[in-house]
Image: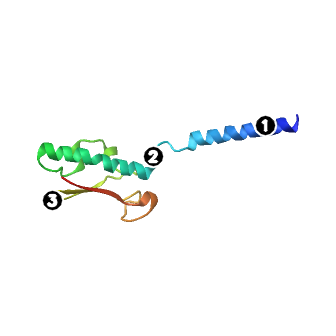
């Protein structure tokens, strides 16, 4: 076998390996942090719709009747839901469940008024 054929075979195997790695280990959707931010953002509309229909904000997120995935963060921890008058704050304490942190452990929250 010539050196040129050996080089082509090695390059072909290398490309195949890279493609397989990307297929199996590549990102399958938004990062966990972005997923949590999306879930937080997506809760605003059902909370406000509930409040408009019932005349009051829900006391808990469970009152919305949404799946647990919609009311929890990327780590499966339920969001913290707080009402202060007509202001709502929904928070995630991150993967570690503790205030503060960075990356996957970072706190995320949204705040809006009814």
Residue lying farthest left?
Answer: 55
Q: Assess disc 3: are there few (<14), some (14-19) or many (≥20) residues with their C-alpha within 10 Å of its C-alpha.
A: few
Instruction: Specify which label sits upstream in the sequence, 1 or 3.
Output: 1
Taking the image as shown, residue 107 lies to the left or right of residue 83, namely: right
Query: Residue at left 12%, top 44%?
Result: 54
Q: Are marks 2 and 1 in contact (CB under 8 Å)?
A: no
Quadrant of the snapshot with the N terminus: top right
Residue 31, given in percent of the width and then of the height, sits at 46, 49
Alpha carbon distance from label 1 to label 3 = 70 Å
Judge left or right: residue 17 versus residue 105: right
Q: Residue 8 has which mark? A: 1
Q: CA distance from mark 2 to mark 3?
A: 34 Å
Upstream in sequence: badge 2 or badge 1: 1
Q: Secondary structure at mark 2?
A: loop
Q: Within the image, what quadrant is residue 10 found in?
A: top right
How far apart are labels 2 and 1 at the CA level?
36 Å
Using a 10 Å C-alpha cutoff, classify the residue at mark 2 as few (fewer than 14 neighbours), some (14 to 19) or many (20 or more): few
Residue at the right extreme of this rendering: 2
Q: Nearer the viewer, residue 107 or 95?
A: 107
How crowded is the residue under tag 1: few (<14 C-alpha within 10 Å), some, or many (20+)?
few
Q: Secondary structure at mark 1?
A: helix
Residue at label 2?
A: 30
Position above or below: 89 against 13: below
Circles 1 and 3: CB atoms closer than 8 Å: no
Q: Which residue is mark 3?
A: 85
Quarter residue 87 falls in = bottom left
Residue lying at 49% horizontally and 42% vertically, measured from the top left: 28
Pointer 2 or 3: first along the chain: 2
* Residue at x 47%, y 43% (from the top left corner): 29
Judged from the image, the secondary structure of the residue bearing numbered disc 3 is: loop
Q: How is the image coloured?
A: rainbow
Q: Position of residue 53 (x, y in %)?
A: 14, 42
């Amino acid at each position: 076998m010539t050196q040129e054929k050996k080089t082509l075979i090695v390059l072909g195997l290398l490309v195949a390996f890279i493609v397989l790695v990307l297929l199996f280990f590549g990102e399958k959707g938004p990062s966990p942090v972005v997923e949590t931010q999306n879930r937080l953002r997506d809760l605003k509309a059902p909370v406000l719709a509930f409040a408009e229909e019932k005349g009051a904000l829900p006391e808990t997120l469970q009152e919305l009747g949404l799946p647990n995935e919609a009311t929890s963060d990327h780590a499966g921890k339920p969001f913290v839901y707080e009402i202060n008058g007509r202001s709502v704050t929904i928070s995630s304490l991150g993967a570690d469940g503790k205030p503060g942190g960075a990356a996957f452990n970072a706190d995320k929250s949204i705040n809006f008024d009814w």
